[in-house]
Amino acid sequence: MRVVGGNYRSRPLKAVPGMNTRPTTDKVKESMFNVLSPYLSSCHLCLDFYAGSGALAIEAVSRGVDQAVLCEQNHIALKTIEANLLMTQELSKFHLLKGNNRQALKRWFNDTSKVFDLVFLDPPYKKGRYLEDLRWLKKESMLADQAVILCESDQEHQWDSEVDDFEWVKSKKYGQSYLSLLIYRGDEVE
C-alpha cells in the first residue's frame, strides 16, 4: 500500500494487521481521486470518518487538501494511523480523534466549529451506515455547503432522493467496491 499521488506520492503506507479492516486498494484509491480531482481545489478540511489506516485522509492532504480529521476507535488501527501520519512529516495537518467516531467528532467540532468540505464514508462493509452518517453530519451542521462526500461500499446503493439536501453525482464499481459521489446542497433554496 502506498500514497498514489501528490506531495507524498509513492511513499509506503502500513496496512492495519488482521482482518477487521479492509484497506482501499491503490487502484481503487487512484480511481477515487480521479473522480474527486475536479473538486479538490475547493476542499480545505477533510473528514475520514472510518479512518482504518488513514490512507484516504493522507492521500487527500497529499493532493492539496489543507487539513484532515481522522476518526478511529480500533486500537490496532490507531497505531497504524499514527505510524502512517509520521511518514508525512507534517503532523500539524492531521487531527486524529480516538474513540467512538460520533462522540469524538462531536467534541472536536464543539471545540473548533470547523466544517468539512470533503468527507470519506467507508464504514465496515457489513455495517453500511451511509444514510445514518449523512443525516447525523447534516443534523450536527458539520458540512460546508457544497461539501463533497465519497462513499465506499461492497454493494450498489440507489441514492435517488433518500437524503434531503444531498445530490447524487455518480456511482461506479471498481472490483468489489462501489463508489458513490454526493454533494451537500444544504444552503440552497429550491
Image: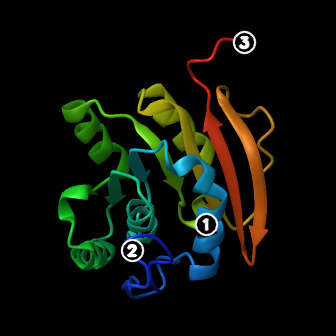
Q: What residue is at 52 percent from the left and 43 percent from the top?
A: 133
Rounded to the nearest angstrom, the CA distance separating label 2 from label 1 is 16 Å
Q: Amino acid at mark 3?
A: Glu
Residue 129 visible, this angle: no
Residue 41 visible, this angle: yes
The first of marks 2 and 1 along the sequence is 2
**Where is residue 177 drawn, in percent x and y?**
70, 70
Rounded to the nearest angstrom, the CA distance separating label 3 from label 1 is 34 Å
| Residue 125 tag number | 1
Left or right: 163, with 109 as reference point: right
Name the foreground residue: 137 vs 20: 137
| Residue 164 tag number | none
Name the foreground residue: 21 vs 5: 5
Q: For the residues labelled 3 and 1, say whether their Cβ atoms are less than 8 Å apart.
A: no
Q: Residues within 10 Å of mark 1 (few under 14, many from 20)?
A: some
Q: Residue furthest top?
A: 189
Callout in the foreground (3, 1): 3
Residue tagged by mark 2?
53
Q: Residues within 10 Å of mark 2 (few under 14, many from 20)?
A: many
Q: Amino acid at mark 1?
A: Tyr
Callout in the foreground (2, 1): 2
Q: How is the image coloured?
A: rainbow
Compared with residue 34, is residue 100 higher up or lower down, i.e. above or below? above
Residue tagged by mark 3?
190
